[in-house]
Every structure is written in C-alpha cells, then in structure tokens.
Amino acid sequence: MGTGKQVFVQNLVIGSDQEAPFLVLNLTRGRTSRGNPYLNVELGDRTGRIQAKVWEGAESLAGQLAEGTVVLVRGYVDSYRGAPQLVIREARSLDPADFDWADYLKVASRPVGEMKADLWALINDLPDDDFRRLTTAALKSPRVEPRFYESAAAKNFHHAHTHGLLEHSLSVGRLAARAAGHYPHLNFSLLVAGAVLHDLGKIWELSLPPRVDYTTAGRLKGHLVMGADYLAEAAAGLPDFPPAKLELLQHLILSHHGEPEFGAAVKPQIMEALVLHHLDNIDAKVEAMGSFLDQETDGQGWSPYHRLMGAYFYRPPDFPESLGRPEAEPPEPEKPLVMEKPPEPEAPDKGRLF
C-alpha cells in the first residue's frame, strides 16, 4: 500500500510545473523534422488520461517509461490544440510497494461482489433450462471465470476499466430482462442469455488491466467470432444440447454490432438480435457519455469534443427531483371528488362556415 497519490490528471493546470506519479498507458517513438528522437507518451490515473511528450533525452528516458508501469515524472503542463499536454523532463519508475493501484486504475462504480451476485441471480432465473445451463457452463469455465470478472469492456470507449466487462454485461442483461417483459413475444431466456454473453470474447480480445490493449488474436479475429466459437465448445460439453438453440445464441453474439461496417459478422435477423443490438448500443453510449462528462473543463457543464461520437456534451444543472419524477402513486383525496356538470355547449352560429 502506497502513501497516497496527491496529483491526478483531472487536477493538472496548463502552465504549471508538476512532479507526480502516473501510469504509463502507451509509448511510441518519433523523430522531429530535424531528425531528433522524441517520445509520445500516454499517461493516466483513475481520473483520466493525458498526452505527454519527451523532447530531450528521449533515448535515455524510454527505459524508464515502460508501458503498464507507474512512473514518477517531472515536467510542466503545456497546451496543444487547446488540451493539456505534459512535457516530461525526468522520469523514474516506481516499485509496486510504493503506490496503490487503486489510484491508477478506474474501477466499476459498484463493488464486484454485488455485481456478481446480481448477474447470477439473473442467470439462475432464466426459465429455459438449455439457455440457463449453457450460460452457466460458459461463465464457470476455468478459461473464463477469473478473466470475465476482471476485464475491461473496451480499450477506450465505454466501461474501459477494471470489472468493466462484468458491469456492462450485467447492465445489458438487466435491460434485456425489462425489454422482454415489455415485449412478451420476445424469447426471454434467449435475449437475456445473449445479453449476458454478447461480449464474452473480449476476455481474449483485450489484455487485462493495468494496460488494456488489443491482443494479436483480438485484432485478427475479434470478440464476436471468438465468443461464438467458444460458445460452441461450451455447448459440446453439455449432454444433448439442442443445435438450433446454440445457433440462435451464436447469432445474437455475431450480430450485436448491428452492421458489418461496425464489426458485425451478420446483421440481426431475429427480433431478439435486433433488440440486443440496440440495448448494447444504448448502454455503451450512456456510459461513454457519462464518463466523458466527468472530464468537463470549461466550468459551464460542457465536455471537450468527443472524437468518436462527434459532439460536445452538456451536463444540465440539477433540478429538484420532484420537478421531474412523478410520485409512484397519487395520494388519496381527503374527500370524494365531486365532478361538476360541464356547461351546456352554446348553439352554433348559423352564419359561420367553420
């Protein structure tokens, strides 16, 4: 356990000198127009990320800026295209005994134990025995269980933190259960099982924290294909599992990105697949927008420009809850309501056409 981090990314002010530890998320090398070496570095902590540069001593400092390590850096905060950029002058890697990972890794908003309990309550309540036992077998496998609970759901866009995959899968699963209740012609077990398992392949597509990045297999095949393939392996270990049900569940996984241009292997072709695609999209974008709004910089509630979503976002001021949320049930009137007889309508003016 470390002594506690004092300076976080969200506190960095343009024009200030800084000496503080940060997690090295990415490191690339480059050369200036004059041929001098420099380093592009992405640093971060649980409050956000910042781009950094090493202009002087790049070769010697590269060894101190290993990806996935926590490094004490000295430098100053410059501005590049309106955003803060840290110019590093010195750097020294820290021993894990000298810091607390909780200062550097953003985690889910809820305790992992609570989320696991809620997830398994959802799975155990699936009325279809086949979908319930396949979902259970898939998540209980030693190949899956430890990674599923630790993994991020993405590298950057949404739920990009420790336990993020669990958080996202549970959230989409709960949305699926509500959607199936709202549209009773949907197959409840198929939709909820597909929601819980739709991103399972990400445990092989992405490396585990602290540095989340795409694996070679992840780049070559992607999490949709890897998830569907793994599901076939899990079903093969279950006695007499119906092939038709496996195909339907695989279709939900392979189509949940909606369109081939967004990574879908096929378009949604059954109602449950279409619903899952939109629920996944909603949950990802709501979380991404909320996380981005947490980085607002102008003091007026406006976020920086979000490159992937192509917009600035605004957080409205809080209003009293009573103004926007109706009471669950209207209060009982003290006396019976007496309905007044409506006035007799006036006779129409015969001289008017309308």
Image (tube, rainbow, N blue to C red):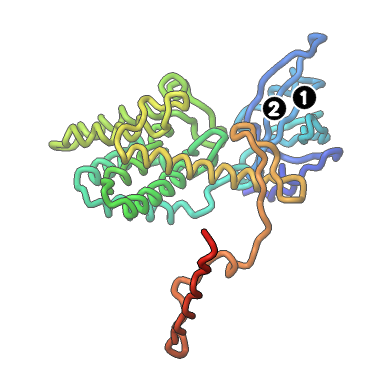
Check disc 2: other Cα within 10 Å, few if <14, some if 14-19, many if 20+: many
Looking at the image, residue 223 sits to the left or right of residue 12; the answer is: left
Closer to the camera, 89 or 47?
A: 47
Mark identifier at residue 40: none
Label 1, secondary structure: give it: strand
Going by the picture, which residue comes out furthest to the bottom? 335
Label 2, secondary structure: give it: strand
- The location of residue 335, given as percent across then percent down, is 45, 90
Residue drawn at x 75%, y 13% as measured from the top left: 31
Mark identifier at residue 41: 2
Residue drawn at x 48%, y 75% as measured from the top left: 345
Looking at the image, residue 53 sits to the left or right of residue 117; the answer is: right
Q: Are marks 2 and 1 in contact (CB under 8 Å)?
A: yes
For disc 1, the marked residue is 54
Closer to the camera, 131 or 62?
A: 131
Residue drawn at x 47%, y 21% as measured from the top left: 219
Check disc 1: other Cα within 10 Å, few if <14, some if 14-19, many if 20+: many
**Which mark is first along the chain, 1 or 2?**
2
Residue drawn at x 77%, y 32% as measured from the top left: 85
Going by the picture, which residue comes out furthest to the top? 35
Count of marks overlaid on the render: 2
Looking at the image, residue 166 sits to the left or right of residue 79; the answer is: left
